[in-house]
Image: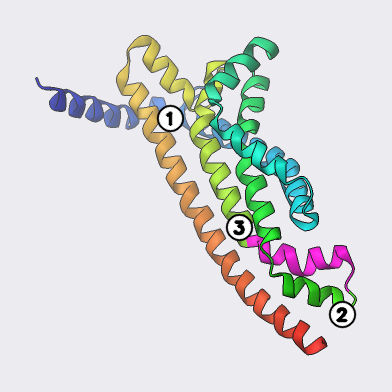
Amino acid sequence: MDEKGAGMNILLDALTWLTVPAHWLGESGILVRTAQHLGLTLLIVTLAALIALPLGTWIGHTGKGRWLVSATGAARAIPTLGVLTLAGLWLGIGLAAPTLALLVLAIPPLLSATYSGIASTPRATVDAARAIGLTEPQVLAQVEAPHAAGLVAAGVRSATLQVIATTTLAAYTANYGLGRFLYEGLKTRDYAEMIGGAIVVVALALVTDALLALIARRLRARTHSYSDNENNSLKESL
């Protein structure tokens, strides 16, 4: 049998593996593993947002600390598996190591998007807002933040997809998430399980991407509408 035929057989075996009810149920089933995967992804993106959004907003609004955006952007070049290995040696077995490694992955796109969104607000609009007496917090909340919403949503989308794809590495130091199917399948040479787990991860990423794309599209539409209304209001006030 040629390589193409063998690959097709493995794919068919994986699809068959996915149709077995026993693989979906129980503490180690696909449903539980998917919930774990999504839960860890939500935790990582939330923690990254709590760090990156305020920091990116401050940098974009004040223009100070721009080097942090460049530095965190350079951190994207660091292999996540390498960070996970070092974190595992330091923190040991469990979820602490993958949480740290995934935070390193998730913060840069969120920080960059937030900074870019705030900093790209037209200076004329910001100056007009200040001219009519708005305080700096009001300028940020009423002018810059709405303008940045679309880019921030895109950053959340990018970070979430990267984390979903890379959370499979959590199984490297913890018996957690969908990555366990990949590691167990590779270890036991059960390629149907390994490919089946990969298919679930891909499907999860595609569904999540579609939902986040829809949210980002609506936010961009609202942002453009809000920006136009805000610009008109500021012009009338001057």
Q: Label 3 sits on what residue type?
A: Leu
Q: Which mark sits nearer the N-terminus, 3 or 2?
A: 2
Judged from the image, the secondary structure of the residue bearing numbered disc 3 is helix
| Residue drawn where x is 43% and y is 46% of the image | 206
Q: Which residue is mark 2?
A: 132
Q: Quadrant of residue 98?
A: top right
Residue 151 on image: x %, y % = 60, 58
Between 226 and 77, which is closer to the camera in this rendering? 77
Highlighted magenta segment, given as a residue range: 134-149
Residue type pointed to by label 2: Ile
Residue 28 horizontal side relative to residue 100, left or right? left
**Residue 42 in view of the camera:** no
Mark 3 vs 1, N-terminal side: 1
Residue ID for mark 3: 151
At mark 2, the secondary structure is loop
Residue depicted at 56% across the width and 43% down the height: 160
Helix, strand or loop for the magenta stretch, by majority: helix
Residue 90 percent across, percent down from the top left: 69, 12
Q: Nearer the viewer, mark 2 or mark 1?
A: 2
Residue 223 sits above or below residue 28 on the image: below
Q: Nearer the viewer, mark 3 or mark 2?
A: 2
Residue matched to label 1:
24
